[in-house]
Amino acid sequence: MKTIGVLTSGGDAPGMNAAVRAVVRTAIANGMTVKGIRRGYNGLMEDDVIELGARDVSDIIQLGGTMLYSARSSRFKTEEGLAEAMATCKKHGIEGIVVIGGDGSFRGARDLSLRGIPCVGIPATIDNDISSTEYTIGFDTAMNTVIDMVDRLRDTCDSHARCSVVEVMGRRAGHIALRTGLSVGAVAILVPERDTSVDEVIEKIERTRALGKKHFIVMVAEGVGGVDEMAKKIEATTGIETRGTILGHVQRGGAPTVRDRVIASQMGFEAVNLLKEGIGNRVVAYKLGKIVNYDIYEALNMHKPFDEYMYLVADTTSI
Ligand code: F6P
């Protein structure tokens, strides 16, 4: 391959820039030309393409967001959209593409691969909800942002002997809630993978209050939701002043952590090495400390089990 493209798609995640940098520089080191496709698949359909040299990706490894911008595109799923994307590839001589994003982005990568443009996916989303990989770029940074915010909430909770019910992102998965809940000593963690009633939360608060606990954090994944109603019910039942807080998009920004910069760089390097060999329709993944790769179809059909052990650790230690 002489020319490859790179794009970021779906919700942005800290570390995407580090992945773009690694893709560009690995490709250049292997004698290839790199085209940056802006605004995800929208840019591919609308010919929003720029050439990227080694210096164009200087000073981005430490930046959150994505220099290529990102988008979710429903039009790309149509035959018309795909035809436009193929025309852009032809115009720029793009022979393969590295797609940095989530499962939805990988479906697009599969569709392009089937039409003769080999694509390699790199998993990037703060949610860590991609089944084929133990780790997705952005997860660590987002969790560090959450614990920083919740540590601040804890200060005011402590001063007023209150309860804080905090909603964190994660789409339909509870990975962020589980690990951050453990890390801030949440009295209860509610995730979509597990049924927990508000009555059980209240029972745990009452039980730990009887053991001397004076302030409480309840961590709720957005896939469960309902923090304000929950806060009202906790206050009405226990008499403990309770506030609901939705952390929201602040979790998606900020400088990537070491973990995100390192894994993004490794994945970018690996993705280009696959394309260099003409291998497409793959996604790179993190497994047991190593970067591996899978067929996209196989990857999309994998299942990621909920970490019951982690839940048990969190529940047992928050008394
Ligand atoms: O996938 C990342 C994520 O931030 C999810 O946690 C959340 O459900 C969703 O994206 C929010 O999407 P939007 O940026 O469209 O509001």
Image (tube, grey):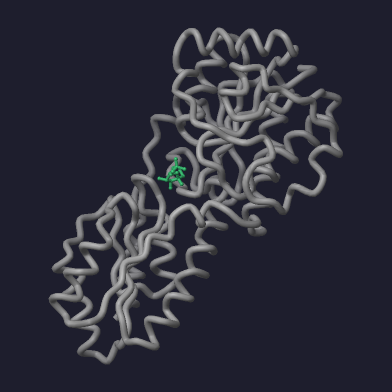
Q: How many marks?
A: 0
Percent coordinates x, y for residue 272 in the rendering: 71, 30
Task: Please state if 227 lies on the left or on the right of 252 as rendered.
Answer: left
Please determine whether, in this image, residue 90 is positioned above or below residue 244: above
Percent coordinates x, y for residue 315 in the rendering: 30, 71
Q: Residue at x 25, y 80 (%)?
A: 241
User: In the image shown, does 168 or 125 lie closer to the viewer?
Assistant: 168
- The quadrant the C terminus occupies is bottom left
Q: Residue at x 26, y 63 (%)?
A: 228
User: In the image shown, does 256 or 251 lie closer to the viewer?
Assistant: 251
Please determine whether, in this image, residue 65 is positioned above or below residue 189: above
- The quadrant the N terminus occupies is top right
Q: Residue at x 71, y 22 (%)?
A: 49
Task: Please state if 221 lies on the left or on the right of 38 as rendered.
Answer: left
Please determine whether, in this image, residue 213 is positioned above or below residue 3: below
Q: Residue at x 43, y 75 (%)?
A: 153
Occupied quadrant, residue 92: top right
Quarter holding ligand 1: top left
Task: Please state if 265 lies on the left or on the right of 73 as rendered.
Answer: right
Percent coordinates x, y for residue 116 in the rendering: 60, 10
Percent coordinates x, y for residue 131 in the rendering: 43, 40
Occupied quadrant, residue 113: top right
Please determine whether, in this image, residue 270 is positioned above or below residue 254: above
Occupied quadrant, residue 258: bottom right
